Image: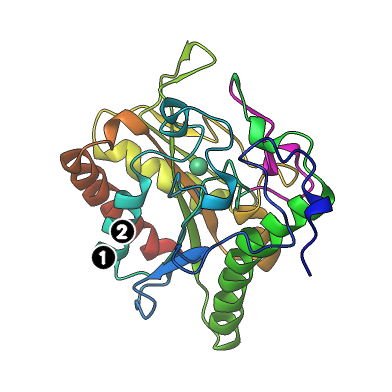
Amino acid sequence: MSSTKTIPRPENRWRHDPGQPLLAIDEPPPYAVVNPDGASPYLLLCEHASNRIPRALGDLGLPEAERRRHIAWDIGVSALSQHLSRALDAPLFMTNYSRLVIDCNRPLAAPSAIPQTSETTDIPGNLDLTEAEKQQRIDTLFTPFADAVARRLDRLQADGKRPLVVGIHSFTPVYFGKQRPWHAGILHGEATGFGRTLVRELQNEASLTIGDNEPYNIHPDEDYTVPVHADARGLPGALIEVRHDLIDTLSGVGEWGDRLTRCLVAALKEFG
Ligand SMILES: [Zn+2]
């Protein structure tokens, strides 16, 4: 079954023989479901919750300081999305591995699905991967998460329900050396009404600068959650992006968790 021939550069400890399992038995599964029976119509996703790298891939050739940076995960969103799951009584699907291994919010054809560079950092463990190495990351980490979310949505829609799909993200205050002006942003695709309602609700909250399709916008070539899980199904869907220095403490998570809960509850009056 396994073949040492498939290790292209055995001298690099972050290379892994794809004939061997990517995850060991004592490592976390690819994703976790929090509050699976939550009654809210919201289905929360957290695709960038963790900076964990499977042990088989070592450190991907990155020093610890890089692995703790926003390039590896969305800082603060694991705690924030769990706060929202609790406050809204909403199911939450969250990944357990770093987007540097494979990004669960990217179409598989996107070069950034397994990034060779993130911002200005080269990812040595992602260079010159064989098709078998890429496929193993897809099969082990990407597909189980995508399929679990799709199965849940299939079941809810078969029961005549209309779930609202919301991904919880954070962004770095400074990107490529440029300071960003927003406190938070709402990214939406086809569900512009739902997206703009969330923007409006957030703007009503306090004197905040809220991005409408900023600091990013949704594109089917670069995004997975909104185009596939929401737009293709005709469901309301959006990503919430919070500047990560606002949610890197428990008090920040509490403040933004309560604020976003109020906005999401208010949007249900129109879209629930
Ligand atoms: Zn993100």
* Residue toward you, 39 or 98: 98
Badge 2 local density, few (<14 within 10 Å), some, or many (20+)? Answer: many
Q: Residue furthest left?
A: 251
Q: Specify whether residue 245 is painted magenta.
A: no
Residue 156: x %, y % from top left: 53, 81
Q: Is residue 120 left or right of residue 93?
A: right
Residue marked by disc 1: 86
Q: Amino acid at mark 2?
A: Gln
Q: Does label 2 point to a residue whose CB lies under 8 Å from ligand 1? A: no
- The magenta region covers 106-119
Q: Are marks 1 and 2 in contact (CB under 8 Å)?
A: yes
Res 40 quadrant in image: bottom left
Q: Is residue 114 left or right of residue 176?
A: right
Spot occupied by residue 68 in the image (x, y as percentages of width and height): 41, 33
Q: Please, which residue is most extreme toward the top here?
A: 177
| Residue matched to label 2 | 82
**Main SS of residues in magenta:** loop
In this picture, is 132 found above or below 31? above
Q: In the visual, does 85 lie left or right of 231?
A: left
- For numbered disc 2, what is the local secondary structure? helix
Q: Amino acid at mark 1?
A: Arg
Disc 1 on helix, strand or loop? helix
Near-viewer residue (154 or 160)? 154
Q: Residue at x 33, y 42 (%)?
A: 76
